[in-house]
């Protein structure tokens, strides 16, 4: 019975990650025009969608493969909390510095 449950969990993980990756790939191929012309926080809606989907995938991978899905809420927060603070901060630095055109020297 336990083997059946673990096999089911593996397939659920596979299909969730497959779906999220497929959405990312299809958006990358077709690049909907409305997502390229609209901006959110200084970034195109398409790029923001990629960022959000990637963070969702990262959280799901951490929760599944680090076995956080069945832990207490305080342990989940102590592991995922810094990730939720650090990733937006690093994205802010990346996106703000990417548009900087200052002269050197």
Image (spheres, helix red, strand yellow):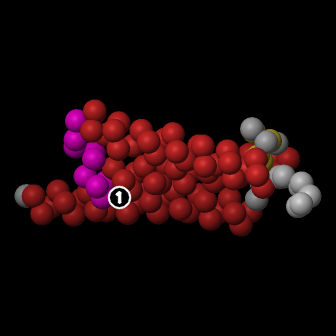
Q: Is residue 80 left or right of residue 23?
A: left
Q: Give the range drawn in magenta.
A: 64-72
Which corner quadrant holds the C terminus?
A: bottom right
Is residue 41 visible in the rendered image? The answer is yes
Q: In this view, does 40 lie to the left or right of 86?
A: right
Q: Residue furthest top?
A: 74
| Residue 60 position in % (x across, y down) | 40, 51
* 7 to 69, vertically: above or below: below
Is 2 within the magenta?
A: no
* 63 to 75, vertically: above or below: below
**Badge 1: how crowded within 10 Å, few (<14), some, or many (20+)?**
some
Write down the residue under mark 1.
13
User: Residue, x 28% and y 33% (percent of image)?
Assistant: 74
| Residue 25 position in % (x across, y down) | 62, 65
| Residue 100 position in % (x across, y down) | 84, 52
Is residue 12 visible in the rendered image? The answer is no
User: Residue, x 89% and y 54% (percent of image)?
Assistant: 102
Q: In this view, does 99 lie to the left or right of 95?
A: right
User: Residue, x 68% and y 48% (percent of image)?
Assistant: 93
- In this rendered view, identify the residue nearer to me: 90 or 67: 90
- In this rendered view, identify the residue nearer to me: 94 or 53: 94
Is 67 within the magenta?
A: yes
Q: Is the magenta stretch mostly helix, strand or loop?
A: loop
Quarter-of-image position of residue 82: top left
Could you tell me which secondary element the residue under label 1 belongs to?
A: helix
| Residue 22 position in % (x across, y down) | 56, 63
Looking at the rendered structure, the number of numbered marks drawn on it comes to 1
């Amino acid at each position: 019975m336990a083997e059946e449950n673990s096999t089911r969990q593996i397939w659920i993980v596979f299909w969730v990650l497959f779906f999220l990756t497929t959405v990312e790939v299809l958006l990358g191929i077709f690049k909907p025009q409305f997502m390229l012309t609209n901006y959110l926080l200084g970034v195109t809606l398409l790029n923001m969608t990629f960022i959000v989907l990637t963070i969702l995938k990262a959280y799901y991978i951490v929760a599944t493969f680090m076995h956080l899905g069945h832990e207490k809420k305080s342990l989940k927060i102590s592991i995922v909390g810094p990730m939720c603070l650090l990733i937006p901060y690093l994205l802010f630095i990346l996106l703000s510095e990417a548009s900087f055109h200052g002269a050197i020297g």
